[in-house]
Image (cartoon, grey):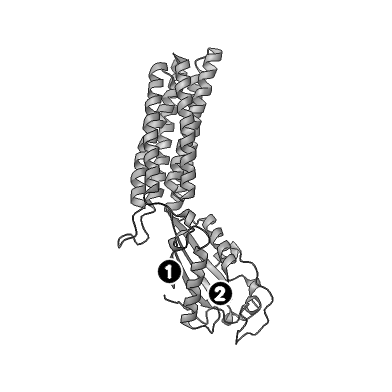
Amino acid sequence: MTIATAPHGSPPEEAEPPGLRVRVGVVSLLVSVVLLAVKYVAYLHTGSAAILSDALESIINVVAAAFAVGSLRIATRPPDRGHPYGHGKIEYFSAAFEGGLIAFAALLIVWYAVRDLVRGAEIADIELGLALTTAAGLANAALGWFLLRAGKKHRSITLVADGHHVLSDFQTSLGVVVGLVLVKLTGLAWFDPAAALLVGLNLALTGYRLVREAAGGLLDEEDATLIARLVGAFEQVRFPGIIRLHRLRAIRSGREAHADAHLIVPEFWSVEQAHDASVELERRIFALPAIDGEIVFHVDPCMRALCSSCDMVDCAVRERAFVARPRLTVDEATRGDVLPDLRDGADDERSVGGGARRPTEVSS
């Protein structure tokens, strides 16, 4: 098998400066502290349940941002003897932790909202509360957009989760502003806890989504986007000798991608030929998409089962003429064997992956 790391093939514009994600996390933490102070001042002056709900979520923002910074520092550590696949999964744990905090904040917000609806709400100094909450909300919108953009560009689930959380905080502030405006226009104080109740329910949904996504990563759920990208890359760089690809599997560990697949090559190739071809293939694949990590290739002999889809010109054992090379699909690439309609009708003993011969494993 061949194992290759992707950074050598990543396009220069995608290169990430050392510690960049950590610095982005620190920015998020500092901004969250400032916005928490602003919202707490607004609550002290108004006594608004909606503003209190906004401030409660900001406390979660600060705790989550601090945890995210620590997680990002750990995630950047290189693989070692105890963690041969690196430390990237800490980012999923961080996202699950943040989602859990959001859900906890949602419960607190709902509790205070229901309490004020039952007891009756008293709101003071609405104008100041509106001004401070609006300013904090706009700042959160800008920070959330910045975190999402950085997280997607550098493929950090921690930054993406933090960005979603901050944007949910913006939605909270928006709900608070709407509630305060309604109180001011109508004089009905119950609009304030009603807005807080809606905010709490929305936050509970956001927390669930974050936990669900993080759980998928921790349980090595297949990354469909990564699979599709790898299949597309194989289609772009394929060359004679690499006949088909199947049994493709890929997962993410934070920023790192770990993939393995079986390559079907001419049965008469030597170990050295198969090795050189697989090394060249992985080099070409990782030169296209910006994927960091590793890919492991196993090599299967064609056993003349795919002659009509093999474009090897100098094949000495060909039994049928080359007709066409069908486009590789995700379905074929992820199957345990090549699709039946790609075969030439050879009996089971000679078909790819059959029991007559075990696939050859080529070591680099």
Q: Which amino acid does label 1 sit on?
A: Ile
| Residue farthest top in this picture | 187
Q: Which residue lies furthest to the front in this view?
A: 12
Amino acid residing under circle 2: Ile
In the shown orientation, is residue 137 left or right of residue 32? right
- Number of the label disc, if any, that sits on residue 242: 2
Query: The C terminus appears in which quarter of the rendering?
Result: bottom left
Q: Is mark 1 on a helix, strand or loop?
A: strand
Indicate the position of residue 258 as horizontal and vertical percent values.
Answer: 44, 61
Place of residue 155 in the rendered image (x, y in percent of width and height, measured from the top left)? 46, 51
Left or right: 239 as drawn, with respect to 205: right
Binning the other alpha carbons within 10 Å of mark 1 as few (below 14), some (14 to 19) or many (20 upward) gives some
Query: In the current view of this chain or complex, which residue is farthest to the left?
Result: 81
In the picture of the structure, the residue carrying the numbered disc 1 is 3
Q: Which of the two labelled residues, at mark 1 and mark 2, occupies the earlier sequence position? A: 1
Q: State the residue in front, 146 or 255.
A: 146
Left/right of residue 10 with respect to residue 68 in the rendered view: right
At numbered mark 2, what does the secondary structure look like: helix, strand or loop?
A: loop
